[in-house]
């Protein structure tokens, strides 16, 4: 979902955005600039990269299963 806001920029900044980015692309340009500062995308990218690593995922699954097996053995 998109939300609309009003921001105030200097005339020089607005003119540069208008000439360089274009009137209908300013919002996306500003959002792209803000996103890494507001949302920790580097963390998301890191999680995606780890999930794509099949060897690592396989080792992690073995570890989780072994840990779960140990927990089952400790139950009375």
Image (spheres, rainbow, N blue to C red):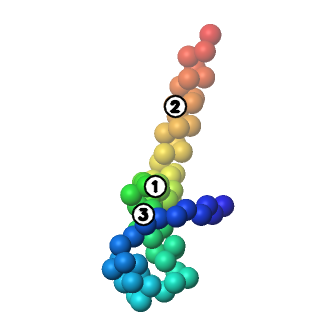
Q: Residues within 10 Å of mark 3 (few under 14, many from 20)?
A: few
From the viewer's side, name the closer residue of 56 and 5.
Answer: 5
Residue 75 locus on image (x, y percent) = 60, 15
Looking at the picture, does residue 24 appear above or below residue 59? below
From the viewer's side, name the closer residue of 15 and 57.
Answer: 15
The answer to which quarter of the image holds residue 4 is bottom right
Of tags 2 and 3, the one toward the viewer is: 3
Q: Which residue is mark 3?
A: 34
- Residue at the spot 56% in from the left edge and 16% down from the top edge: 74
- Residue at the spot 40% in from the left edge and 87% down from the top edge: 20
The answer to which quarter of the image holds residue 10 is bottom left
Q: CA distance from mark 2 to mark 3?
A: 41 Å
First in sequence: mark 2 vs mark 3: 3
Residue 54 locus on image (x, y percent) = 50, 59
Q: Which residue is mark 2?
A: 67
- Disc 1 is placed on an element classified as loop
Q: Which mark is residue 5?
A: none
- Disc 2 is placed on an element classified as helix
Q: In the displayed image of the protein, which residue is found farthest to the bottom? A: 19
Q: In the displayed image of the protein, which residue is found farthest to the left? A: 12
Q: Which mark is residue 39?
A: 1
Quadrant of the rendering where the N terminus is positioned: bottom right
Give the tally of numbered discs.
3
Residue 76 locus on image (x, y percent) = 62, 10
């Amino acid at each position: 979902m998109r939300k609309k806001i009003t921001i105030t920029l200097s005339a020089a900044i607005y003119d540069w955005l208008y000439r360089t980015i274009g009137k209908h692309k300013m919002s996306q340009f500003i959002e792209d600039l803000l996103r890494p500062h507001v949302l920790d995308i580097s963390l998301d990218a890191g999680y995606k990269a780890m999930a794509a690593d099949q060897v690592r995922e396989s080792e992690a699954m073995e570890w989780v299963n072994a840990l779960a097996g140990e927990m089952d053995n400790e139950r009375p």
